[in-house]
Amino acid sequence: MISNERPSPYQHQPYHHFHAAQTPRPFVQEDTLKSGQIQIERKSFFMSLKENPRGRFLRITEDAGGKHNSIIIPTTGLEDFRRLLDELVKAADELPQAKSLSKAA
């Protein structure tokens, strides 16, 4: 076999095409127990406490310029999530800002 007859690793489909060929997930009914929204600069954050047959969870969705990203946190981890968030908020308040950021203010 000569070199130009070898299969190229670059002829594979891009990564995102691989997932498109998979069968979609079945619909799971989700009930919204409580929800809220906050606007921070140009981003909107939607938070919903939801429940489905597998349990309760918090869905946090970011909408920035029409693009949506979500994370899901099971309620069993909400206390740990809150504790870490509290620590990060405290650190943000206590730590001095970088010089490049403070010049812009």
Image (tube, helix red, strand yellow):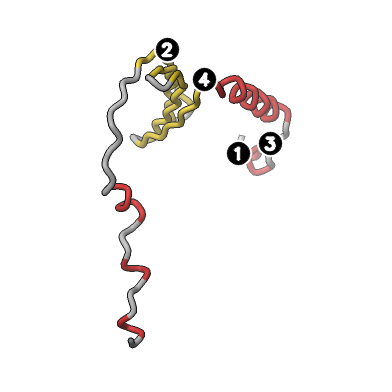
Kind of element beneath mark 1 = helix
Disc marking residue 75: 4
CA separation, marks 2 and 3? Answer: 35 Å
CA separation, marks 4 and 3? Answer: 33 Å
Q: Which badge, 1 or 2, comes first in the chain's sequence?
A: 2
Residue 29: x percent and y percent? 31, 21
Kind of element beneath mark 2 = strand
Looking at the image, residue 91 sits to the left or right of residue 5; the answer is right
Q: Is residue 72 visible?
A: yes
Kind of element beneath mark 3 = loop
CA separation, marks 4 and 1? Answer: 39 Å
As shown in the figure, which amino acid type bears the numbered disc 4? Thr
Q: Residue at x 28, y 31 (%)?
A: 26
Kind of element beneath mark 4 = helix
As shown in the figure, which amino acid type bears the numbered disc 3? Gln
Mark 4 vs mark 3, foreground winner is 4
CA separation, marks 1 and 2? Answer: 38 Å
Residue position for label 2? 34
Residue position for label 3? 97
Residue 88 found in image quarter = top right
Q: Which badge, 1 or 3, comes first in the chain's sequence?
A: 3
Residue position for label 1? 104
Q: Label 1 neighbourhood size at 10 Å, few (<14), some (14-19), many (20+)?
A: few
CA separation, marks 4 and 2? Answer: 13 Å
| Mark 1–mark 2 CB contact (< 8 Å) | no
